[in-house]
Image (cartoon, coloured by chain):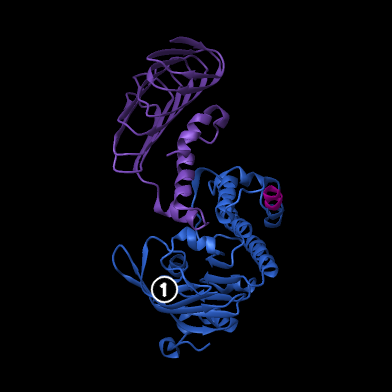
Chain colours: A purple, B blue
């Protein structure tokens, strides 16, 4: 699938996907499903992506090709089988900005792997390249996070955070101390973990139903 | 209301004894304050009453309205009507404050909340607590000031309408004006619910100027070593905990 994005859109990914974001656009994309996807972001674009799904594997490349382009990528997955997310952010122009938030709930005993790379080559100035990866294990699943920051220039601010584990017992105690059952507390925590606060919930109703059913 | 009998509690992780044959009886409508220096088991007691996961009751019992609650889960105890206003309320990113409150009410009443009356009640309470309406739409306690967190605890208290209120270091992180506001709100609730009891955990008597206790207890080494009235708190304010001489010998003298 080749598509030029000129406005907010919802897209169901197929095997191979090429998305070009027009210049000077502020765009919000809702992506569903899985596949190999390349997103090219041109000058002065601000791209926000909400990519959600159940049992999905993805291979995503985001090219920040134009100056002052920005991407915020929210990836939320509910995992029952073996799945992998590979995501690479290439800062190909100066003054580009990336924030990637990958959240997964690994429900059963299968594997979930996040391989996340931010790349800033030499002589690319004034970039900000950040990633946050978290996986909650509900059972004894094998979860792995491989965060890579491949920074080849000095004028860059960059950060990463990675967490694999369960929900905090203190958080659970707080919710239950208000009379909320353990099951409902987990449901609230999973929802708050997987559904970004600014998302348009009407656009992700199916995903919300899937969360309720965990 | 609440009867704690010879309670022995250990920390699960290392087996350290943290409450030692502690007994406390709170009748309906009474206000009790527990005071003591750091590390004597005050906050632990508040958490143990609600079945905190870190602690294990190895002796004695906790009765609420005549029924043992020591084997109940935390949510079951809370639904019985016990509310703990925490010293440092938890932050949960992404969990909308109003959704959290609505869920808590739903779970307690087992009925779907009537949205109109729920929002009306919340709005009234926001005004009384001098809280901005935006607090509904923010993530639970995220980015809240110390005062907002404590007011949010009192907001939850008033919405959930407990029979036993435990205030753990309510005054920590509160300025004088905010402390006055939250205490006025609790007093108003108590005026409307005269059979509700309160257990105040505190280092300092300041909060007791606003919420007047019937009994003041001093805790040391995990057990209550002296019980008195407000004059005991004032003595501690004046002379410190060191002024309580021979407290082991004094025992319970209420």
Residue that sits furthest to the front in the current view: B111
Using the rendered view, name the quadrant where residue A145 is placed.
top left
User: What's the chain of the residue with tag 1?
Assistant: B
Left or right: where does residue B191 sit relative to residue B106?
right
Quadrant in which the N terminus of chain A appears:
top left
- Label 1 residue SS: loop
Q: Is residue B53 placed above or below B19 in the rendered structure?
A: above
Above/below status of B110 relative to A62: below
- The residue closer to the viewer here, A153 or B46, is B46
Residue A34 in the image: state x and y as whole percent.
39, 21
Q: Which residue is mark 1?
A: B40
Q: Let me know if residue B68 is in the magenta part.
A: no
Where are the magenta residues, as a range?
B117-123
The answer to whether residue A80 is seen in the rendering is yes
Q: Is residue B85 visible?
A: no
For the residue pair A171 and B239, the one nearer the viewer reads as A171
User: Residue at (67%, 46%) from the top-left corner?
Assistant: B115
């Amino acid at each position: 699938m080749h598509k030029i994005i000129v406005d907010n859109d919802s897209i169901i990914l197929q095997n191979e996907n090429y998305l070009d974001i027009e210049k000077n656009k502020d765009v919000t994309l809702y992506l569903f499903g899985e596949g190999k996807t390349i997103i090219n972001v041109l000058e002065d674009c601000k791209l926000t992506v909400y990519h959600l799904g159940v049992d999905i594997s993805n291979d995503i490349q985001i090219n920040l090709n134009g100056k002052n382009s920005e991407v915020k990528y929210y990836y939320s997955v509910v995992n029952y089988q073996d799945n992998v997310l590979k995501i690479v952010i290439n800062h190909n122009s100066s003054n580009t900005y990336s924030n990637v938030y990958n959240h997964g709930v690994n429900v059963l005993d299968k594997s979930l792997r996040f391989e996340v790379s931010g790349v800033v080559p030499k002589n690319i100035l004034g970039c900000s390249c950040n990633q946050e990866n978290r996986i909650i294990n509900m059972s004894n699943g094998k979860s792995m996070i491989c965060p890579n920051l491949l920074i080849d220039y000095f004028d860059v601010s960059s950060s990463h955070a990675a967490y694999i584990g369960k929900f905090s017992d203190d958080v659970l105690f707080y919710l239950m101390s208000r009379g909320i059952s353990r099951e409902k507390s987990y449901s609230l925590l999973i929802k708050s973990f997987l559904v970004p606060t600014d998302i348009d919930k009407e656009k992700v109703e199916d995903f919300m139903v899937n969360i309720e059913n965990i | 209301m609440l009867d704690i009998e010879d309670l022995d509690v250990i920390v699960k992780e290392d087996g350290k004894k943290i409450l030692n044959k502690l007994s406390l009886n709170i009748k309906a409508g009474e206000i009790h304050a527990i005071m003591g220096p750091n590390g004597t088991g005050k906050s632990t007691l508040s958490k143990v009453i609600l079945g905190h996961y870190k602690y294990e009751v190895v002796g004695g019992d906790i009765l609420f309205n005549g029924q043992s609650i020591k084997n109940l889960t935390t949510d079951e105890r809370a639904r019985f009507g016990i509310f703990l206003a925490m010293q440092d309320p938890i932050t949960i990113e992404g969990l909308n404050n109003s959704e959290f409150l609505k869920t808590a009410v739903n779970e307690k009443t087992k009925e779907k909340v009537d949205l109109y009356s729920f929002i009306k009640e919340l709005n009234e309470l926001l005004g009384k607590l001098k809280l901005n309406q935006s607090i509904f739409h923010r993530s639970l306690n995220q980015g809240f000031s110390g005062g907002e967190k404590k007011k949010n605890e009192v907001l939850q208290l008033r919405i959930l309408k407990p029979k036993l209120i435990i205030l753990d270091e309510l005054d920590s992180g509160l300025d004088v004006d905010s402390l006055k506001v939250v205490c006025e709100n609790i007093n108003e609730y108590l005026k409307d619910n005269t059979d509700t009891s309160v257990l105040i955990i505190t280092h300092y008597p300041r909060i007791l100027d606003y919420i007047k206790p019937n009994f003041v207890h001093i805790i040391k080494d995990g057990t209550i070593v002296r019980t008195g009235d407000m004059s005991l708190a004032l003595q501690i304010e004046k002379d410190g905990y060191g002024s309580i001489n021979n407290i082991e010998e004094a025992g319970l003298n209420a």
